[in-house]
Image (cartoon, rainbow, N blue to C red):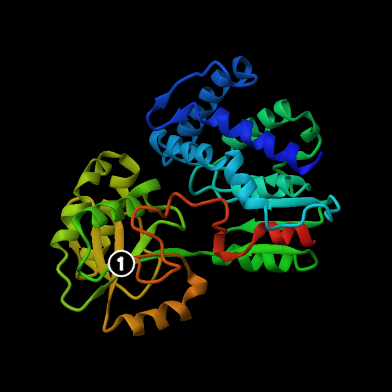
Amino acid sequence: MNLEERIQAFVKLGDFLSQFSTNGIVKKNDIPHNDLFFDGFKHQLKLAREHNGWFTEENILFGLNNWSRALTEKNIKQFTKNYQFHTVTPKKIAIIMAGNIPLVGFHDFFCVLLSGHEVLVKQSSNDKHLLPFLAKYLEYVAPKFKGKITFTEENLKDFDAVIATGSDNTARYFEYYFKGKPSIIRKNRNSVAVLTGNETEEQLSQLSHDIFRYYGLGCRNVSKLFVPENYDFDGFFKAMYAWHPIINEAKYANNYDYNKAVYLMSEFEMLENGFLMIKEDSSYASPIATVFYEHYSSLENLRNELEKSSKDIQCVVSNNLSSNHIAFGETQNPNLWDFADGVDTLEFLLKI
């Protein structure tokens, strides 16, 4: 199976996913094998929602919509143009996936198959319905993928390399367990936003999506703000208000109530608006329904601090304060070439 065949298979998958978006689920007439897969995938969406209360229909469809936009022929060919694929000797690559947001492990799955390797997937129990169904669709549009995609719930064995995503604690286990294999081991990371006080209302409104999408459970969600001394949070809270219906979601509301009670009993100072709390804290990882903040004395000092903490940070959001910062509202819309932890997964796969 050559690279062009693999690319076209994923383009067809992108076309299939284009039927499922936040604007609605609409069956199209020109999608291959649609009579066989469309209703079945709708059922998988239902199962995913029932199995994991964090996987609302809106969040699932938001993720599917992003993948549909990413998996175009133009994007995939731009993604692959700087790599050498003809030297690959097919190997079996194990992927241990997280389950914090829908299809969070799809990029690794995509890279393994695109590179010409076989994939052995161990999914999180929190996100086990969507990917196997999409893998089956790939096998139908590209039968040469059959036998190259395996899902398992058992201990991993008979593989050549591994990509594993988990917490800092599980990463230590992964590093020990897989020490004899080529590996990418991902740990906890969080995203931050740098505010100057000069942001527009629209920019702060876009920041709200970086904070609240997926309930803040993703590593690309902003969990901490860096603000100048004497920063006025009134404009920030005003811009967040559009997300106030989130407090009607039971799991989110339970976390909000619990964390608020902890802060009050501990006599921590915090600000809140009925659905979001902000607390001054030096940590990067904040609990659900909370965003931490920290003051900075100068942007130059802050740049140095962020550089020193780069291993803990996935994205930095700002109003173009640095060339490697992300625009407000864009953290959950990554490109194919925006690799997790800054580690080039495709380069790793093509060199093992």
Most distant residue in the right direction:
89
Residue 6: tell me if it is visible.
yes
> Quadrant location of residue 141?
top right
Q: Secondary structure at mark 1?
A: strand
The C terminus lies in which quarter of the figure?
bottom right
Apparent side of residue 286 relative to residue 264 in the rendered image (left or right): right
Task: Decide which of 212, 259 is in the foreground and name it.
Answer: 212
Residue picked out by circle 1 = 292
Q: Residue at x 71, y 57 (%)?
A: 83
Q: Residue at x 64, y 62 (%)?
A: 344
Residue 336 coordinates in the image, percent (x, y): 57, 51
Residue 27 coordinates in the image, percent (x, y): 49, 18
Task: Decide which of 193, 101 is in the foreground and name it.
Answer: 193
Residue 90 coordinates in the image, percent (x, y): 84, 50
**Residue type pointed to by label 1:** Phe
Q: How many marks?
A: 1
The N terminus lies in which quarter of the figure?
top right
Task: Decide which of 196, 166 is in the foreground and name it.
Answer: 196
Apparent side of residue 159 relative to residue 17 in the rendered image (left or right): right
Circle 1 packing at 10 Å, graded few (<14), some (14-19), many (20+), is: many
Residue 156: tell me if it is visible.
no
Apparent side of residue 247 relative to residue 128 in the rendered image (left or right): left
Q: Residue 327, relative to residue 229: is it above or below?
A: above
Q: Residue at x 52, y 23 (%)?
A: 43
Apparent side of residue 307 relative to residue 320 in the rendered image (left or right): right
Residue 277 coordinates in the image, percent (x, y): 24, 59
> Quadrant location of residue 262?
bottom left
Q: Residue at x 15, y 76 (%)?
A: 230
Task: Decide which of 36, 328 is in the foreground and name it.
Answer: 328
